[in-house]
Amino acid sequence: MATGSTDQERRGGTAPTVASTNKEPTTSSAPPKPWYTSFGFQVFLGLVAGLVLGFIARGMGGANEDSGNWLSNLLDGVGSAYVQLLKVMIPPLVITAVITSVANLRKVTNAARLAFSTLAWFAITAFFSVLAGIVVALLLKPGVGTAVDAASAAAPSTHGSWLSFIQSIVPSNILGLGAKAKDDGSIGLNFNVLQLLVVSIAFGVAAVKTGKAAEPFLGFMESLLKIVQTVLWWVIRLAPIGTAALIGTAVSTYGWEALGALGKFVLAIYIGLAIVIGVIYPAVLAMNRIPVAGFARRVWPVFSLGFVTRSSMGVMPVTERVTEQSMGVPREYASFAIPLGATTKMDGCASVYPAVAAIFVAQFYGVDLHFAQYLMIIVVSVLGSAATAGTTGATVMLTLTLSTLGLPLEGVGLLLAIEPIVDMGRTAVNVTGQSVAATIVAKRAGIWDREAWDKAEAGASTQQHLATI
């Protein structure tokens, strides 16, 4: 970013807190690329193609059976492979990006303030999101008159708790790896991003404290980060194909029949999510003088991939890259805020969903909730997402809410039939909120790169950055 008071005033921020990179302004006489070549438009085409293929696969029959049909199996295989490719890049990206980011924080004079502001904006947007969920649930009353079978009630095997959160942030090994036996007897490996974040921060701080002797290590990490990002964008270029396969699988597998007696509940969830996306986020962006329409165009690839992958972790590499390259959030900050947000910033899973679901369970069992209990829903939703970090998101968050309110945990089983359908919208809101918070904090801290924002042409920014690799 360029320095100087005049330039900073043009950007609309305060005095810069990140050291200047001394980049000279660049000009290009090349005409802008047509809108239909943009990455966002290609992802949209993938969504449309996926809908068509999904309905075709569903019409062929057998999609809900174990064997399926050739098209549904193909869509499922391609979609699963794409998500796996994204996930395999998360550990090296977090390790290299966070260590490099911590080292670069030497250039930042208010790193602690940035961290506090990030958590504060996580809480602010979560607060208004849970309010939206409560209001919608009280108006629509999704648990009143529902035809859902009470026999489907069952308590889940995993519950959320604050003790689990404390245990989850203590690394079990240096890579945050865990192993779990599968039903077929095989062993599945997984990683805890929160533990990776803790380990990487510790190594980054240690490298800074070591001084000159650690310079080769930091140089290696920076070089490795560039390699990881290059490989990552090879994977992200396949996003339109992955999007088509994932949305096709969802349509062929669930269709509309899965809604059944829970259609009113699903409607309440999506209205709440729509309020967050269409009202709350635009309002906080506008309050901070960030162009709402421009943000919406830039965040579209993140939103759409979150919707079809149903994985904040899987989308995290895309979220981080788009936030840096298209939204003008410096890498030094984005490398910290986005991984943290991917584990603890869940306005869909931890705010709207538990609020609507808890009220649904109370209405289903005929339990009257009082004002104090609604306040408890707000408190748990604002703070409780941290208690689900490193575990399975929304279901665990719901158990934490239900147990706090004294509602029967068996109510969770009532909602499992439509879990994949509502999870799509929840995840899309989660990943969008992570970008919202990071961009707002960068803007308010005076480190928002307005030049990078301006260079990122509407809807085509990601495609342009892809072309540079």
Image (spheres, helix red, strand yellow):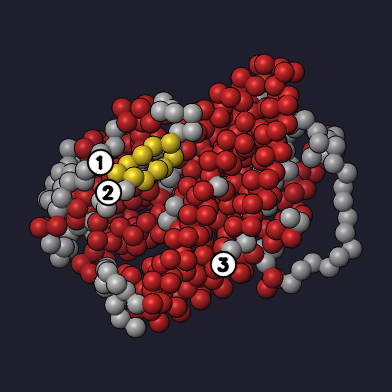
Residue 296 position by quadrant: bottom right
- Name the amino acid, label 2: Gly
Upstream in sequence: badge 2 or badge 1? 1
Q: Are marks 2 and 1 in contact (CB under 8 Å)?
A: no
Question: Residue 375, how many percent across, how many down?
Answer: 30, 37
Q: Which residue occupies 43% across, 36% down? A: 177
Q: Is residue 24 at all visible to an observer of this figure?
A: yes
- Disc 1 crowd rating (10 Å Cα; few below 14, some 14-19, many 20+) is few
State left or right for residue 424 relative to residue 281. Answer: left
Q: Secondary structure at mark 2?
A: loop
Q: Which mark is residue 125?
A: none
**Residue found at the very far left of the displayed protein:** 151
Q: Which residue occupies 50% across, 40% down? A: 341
Q: Which residue occupies 40% across, 59% down? A: 424
Upstream in sequence: badge 3 or badge 1? 1
Reading the image, the residue beneath label 2 is: 185
Q: Secondary structure at mark 1?
A: loop
Question: Residue 152, how many percent across, how many down?
Answer: 14, 57
Q: Secondary structure at mark 3?
A: helix
**Residue found at the very far front of the displayed protein:** 185
